Image (tube, grey):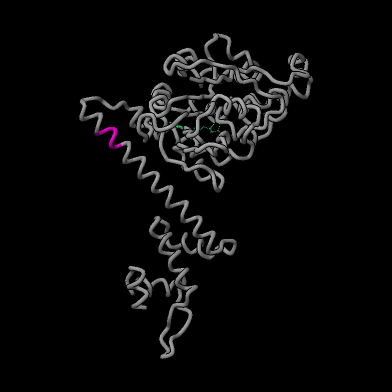
Amino acid sequence: MGRVAGLSGVSVRTLHHYDEIGIVRPSTRTASGYRAYSADDMERLREVLAYRRLGFGLREVAELVDDPSTDAVAHLRRLRGLMLERRDRAEAMVAAIDRELEARAKGLTVTPEEQLGMLGARLYDAIGGAYTATRRTDPRIAAQIWGALGDARTVLNVGAGTGSYEPGDRDVTAVEPSAVMRGQRPAGSARCVAAAAESLPFEDGSFDAAMAVSTVHHWGDPMAGLREMRRVSRRVVVLTFDTDEPEWQDRFWLTRDYLPEFGAVLEDFPSLAGMAEAIGARTEPVPVPWDCADGLFEAYWRRPGAYLEDHVRRAMSVWTRVGPEAERRAVRQLGDDLDSGRWAERNRDLTGLEAADLGLRLLMT
Ligand SMILES: C[S@@+](CC[C@H](N)C(=O)[O-])C[C@H]1O[C@@H](n2cnc3c(N)ncnc32)[C@H](O)[C@@H]1O
């Protein structure tokens, strides 16, 4: 026990405690009859200590190391992911502090949005767990985004979420402030840094291109985030939403007839023209295919029954933003209109349409 304590950097007392509570027990004996740790015991001790150092409580650690579905390699992978996440978070915080120190040294004030940029992640920490049920790559939308990236070799994906639109054939770095979203990124996906768009922890011109998909409307300060993308990259590609026309809510029957509250959600969102001007971008419509594979808010425009499904709505932030009362009312009215044939009557012009322009726009420099 003394030797193991020396090797592992914990006290003999701690090892005794682990033995008493059964979390790591020396399971063999030496020739002279002393209790001793086998190779398996040592492996288990290493896992216990690593999880402890990551801040897990002893009860949680016991559950983790006793999980029969997790072998040593799976533990190493999980530990590696947790350590990288911690390192990324520390790096992002150091970079944000450096930038603030630099700004203060120049006598500049740091806006509350910049200080609080990380808070944009809060919504997705709350609702992000339901995201992967329906949110994934739509190949047609992906093709349009990847086309706009041109010959960019290094790509920064800001507000990356689970990485639905990350091109597989480029060198991608992801930025995502929500731990829940980062935790759902598939094994083997691009390196992901915990940071917010408003304060990107990269030097000027670090990337050939920066992309942001379905995320700008969540940022505390969209204009600051867009300028940051421009600063760190030579090209910017953003999939966002056009609210410039006064009647923009009428483009989609869901907001026109059932959810007018969506207007208030985007009340403070900058104009498309303003965003384009800020980064010197041109705009291009992104039609939503009738069978869109990515369950975004507009995805089911020709499949209205989908909006009655709870798991479909839970993967769309709009429903959380408008609140439960508006959601209940909209779903009830839509259900009634689908039953009575009123929806079909009102939306006859959609029958047979392959794709619809519902206000999604690509900004590209
Ligand atoms: C609708 S998801 C889109 C994710 C991904 N781009 C996609 O297309 O699937 C919006 C993402 O923006 C992230 N987000 C929120 N505030 C942010 C900020 N200030 N900076 C960067 N990302 C932010 C959320 O955490 C969430 O993962």
Main secondary structure along the magenta-highlighted residues: helix
Task: Please check the rendered image and state whether residue 195 is part of the magenta-colored stretch, yes or no.
Answer: no
Residue at horizontal 47%, vertical 19%? 269
Q: Quadrant of the N terminus?
A: bottom left
The magenta stretch is 97-101
Q: Would you say residue 325 is visible in this rendering?
A: no
Q: Between residue 300 and residue 83, name the one nearer to us.
A: 83
Image coords of residue 96 (percent x, y): 32, 36
| Residue 221 located left or right of residue 282 | left
Image coords of residue 148 (percent x, y): 55, 24
Image coords of residue 198 (percent x, y): 39, 29
Residue at horizontal 58%, vertical 36%? 164
Image coords of residue 138 (percent x, y): 64, 31
Figure quadrant of residue 297: top right
Figure quadrant of residue 246: top right
| Residue 354 located left or right of residue 199 | right
Q: Between residue 9 and residue 173, name the one nearer to us.
A: 173
| Residue 186 located left or right of residue 107 | right
Q: Would you say residue 174 is visible in this rendering?
A: yes
Residue at horizontal 55%, vertical 48%? 187
